[in-house]
Amino acid sequence: MTKPSEFGLAFVRAPMEDDEDTGTWISKELTRVEEANLSFYDAFGSRDIEKMARLWSRSPHARCVHPGWELVIGWNDIRQSWVEIFRTLEEVEFELEDVHVEVSGRSAWANLIAHVSASTDEGESFNASVVTTNIFELQENRWVLVLHHSSNFAEEEPMAEDDSVEVTAGSAEFEPN
């Protein structure tokens, strides 16, 4: 399994609760979520559908959003999306930064920026940076993915004065200036 130090990551841990048992549980679960999150990138980087399959919930509420894709719903369609991605990639590497992991009860999430270097089966290479949220759910004493949402950064363009929007509190309508 990939270790956090291999990616040079720093994880933010939630403040410990006053109750020592709760604090110990949170610390243990944060570590387990960190490992599950890194396992996701290990499975992605090795393009291993079986590794990827072990990380995902089979729940009908599982969701996946790849950059530029429509929402993918349910494990069968999510699995097929990974098969298609893995089939077209020759190589993919990640450098993760600003990783933030939180645990709250039976839910956990990791927010991060992933810098991706990849080459395709057609000989094309590309680099991209994406902002990602991975949401995990504790099922049968395992943290499994119920949502992976990764989006390209929007290119920043200066906003023209004519494009500004005025928002009035309590109003459901937006009025352009």
Image (spheres, rainbow, N blue to C red):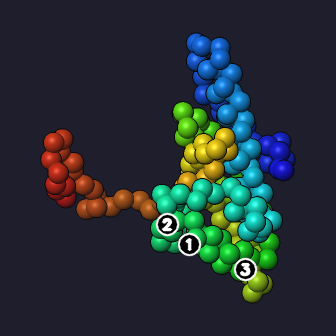
Residue at the front extreme, as displayed: 140
Q: Are marks 2 and 1 in contact (CB under 8 Å)?
A: yes
Query: Counting residues from the N terminus, which is met first, the one under dot 2 or under dot 3?
Result: 2
Question: Distance of mark 1 from mark 3, alpha carbons?
Answer: 15 Å
Does 84 appear above or below 110? below
Residue 73: mark in rendering: 2
Is residue 62 in sight in this rendering?
yes
Question: Distance of mark 2 from mark 1, alpha carbons?
Answer: 6 Å
* Left or right: 37 as drawn, with respect to 106: right
Residue 111 location in percent, x, y?
A: 59, 46
Query: Counting residues from the N terminus, which is met first, the one under dot 1 or under dot 3?
Result: 1
Name the residue type under label 3. Arg
Is residue 149 in sight in this rendering?
no
Identify residue for label 1.
Answer: 77
Residue 28: mark in rendering: none
Name the residue type under label 2. Ile
Name the residue type under label 1. Asp
Q: Nearer the viewer, residue 70 or 51?
A: 51
Residue at 58% of width from left, 35% of height from top? 103
- SS type, badge 1: helix
Residue 87: mark in rendering: 3
Residue 139 location in percent, x, y?
A: 61, 45
Residue at 21% of width from left, 48% of height from top? 167
